[in-house]
Image (cartoon, rainbow, N blue to C red):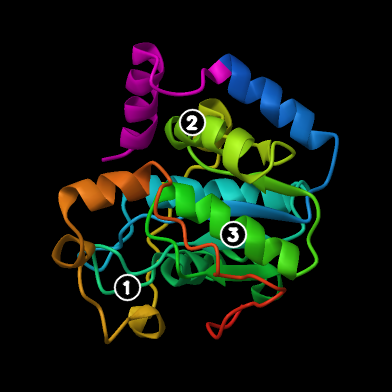
């Protein structure tokens, strides 16, 4: 399985389904000249007691941006959508294991779609007093969210997608990392497939099911931070 993530990203890149690596490099260079109050990292389902290659890539990328001083804080986003574990909390646990200080980690656990990841995380970040915000994820998801961010959230949000060569040098397959996932378990979990029809889920993916009351009026919601 080693380097499977990079192979997948390269295949997507060649198909035009994601931000090109040339543009990813340019965006990283732009990001290196400044410091963001927080980077938003969307979640992905946690299944079979292990993180998959995409989650691994997103967490390592967030740590890289923090270690380089590009990001002061990290907000992982994701509810318990397809599995009974809050995606945001799982990613936070892995980040802690990698050495990211708990004091700079925040979670947003209401989002069930990529559009909601950035929308709710943006609102929560603003409530926390963060001003400069960036999305840090894979090039495929970056391209999918770019237009939505510009039209529906805030065009000032920066984009910092993976740079494949940089991520490869982090040697993400070199460590076997285990976490105690019990703190991320949702005892009231019901799969989104049981709660919503296919068309309802598709609408959510397109950003049409946003709940604008979440994180409104300066609230952080009763979910911890």
- Alpha-carbon span between mark 2 and mark 1: 25 Å
Q: Would residue 108 appear left or right of 28 to someone viewing this image?
A: left
Which dot, 3 or 1, sits closer to the camera?
A: 3
Relative to 41, is 9 above or below? Answer: above
Residue that badge 3 annotates: 121
Residue that badge 1 annotates: 85
Q: Label 1 neighbourhood size at 10 Å, few (<14), some (14-19), many (20+)?
A: many
* SS category of the residue bearing label 3: helix
Q: Would residue 109 appear left or right of 219 to someone viewing this image?
A: left
* SS category of the residue bearing label 2: helix
Seen at 68% across and 45% down, the residue is 134
Q: Label 3 neighbourhood size at 10 Å, few (<14), some (14-19), many (20+)?
A: many
Across and down, in percent, residue 223 comes to 53, 82
Across and down, in percent, residue 141 comes to 45, 36
Relative to 39, is 49 above or below? Answer: below
Residue 165 visible, this orientation: yes
Q: Mark 2 and 1 residues: CB-CB less than 8 Å, in contact?
A: no
Seen at 39% across and 30% down, the residue is 6
Across and down, in percent, residue 118 comes to 55, 51
Q: Is residue 115 magenta?
A: no
* SS category of the residue bearing label 1: loop
Residue that badge 2 annotates: 139
Q: Which residues are magenta?
A: 1-21
Q: Would residue 194 appear left or right of 52 to someone viewing this image?
A: left
């Amino acid at each position: 399985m080693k380097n499977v993530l990079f192979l997948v990203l390269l295949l997507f890149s060649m198909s035009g389904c994601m931000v090109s690596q040339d543009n990813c490099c340019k965006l990283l260079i732009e990001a290196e000249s400044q410091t963001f109050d927080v980077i938003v990292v969307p979640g992905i389902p946690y299944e079979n007691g292990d993180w998959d290659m995409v989650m691994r890539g997103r967490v390592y990328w967030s740590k890289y941006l923090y270690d380089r001083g590009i990001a002061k804080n990290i907000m992982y986003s994701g509810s318990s959508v397809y599995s009974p574990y809050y995606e945001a909390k799982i990613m936070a646990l892995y980040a802690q294991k990698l050495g990211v200080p708990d004091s700079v980690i925040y979670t947003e656990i209401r989002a069930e779609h990529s559009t909601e990841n950035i929308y709710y995380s943006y609102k929560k970040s603003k409530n926390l007093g963060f001003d400069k915000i960036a999305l840090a994820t894979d090039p495929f998801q970056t391209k999918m969210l770019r237009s939505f961010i510009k039209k529906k959230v805030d065009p000032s949000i920066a984009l910092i997608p993976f740079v494949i060569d940089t991520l490869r040098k982090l040697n993400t397959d070199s460590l076997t990392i285990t976490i105690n996932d019990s703190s991320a378990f949702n005892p009231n979990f019901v799969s989104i497939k049981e709660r919503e029809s296919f068309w309802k889920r598709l609408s959510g993916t397109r950003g049409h099911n946003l709940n604008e009351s979440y994180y409104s009026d300066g609230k952080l919601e009763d979910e911890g931070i």
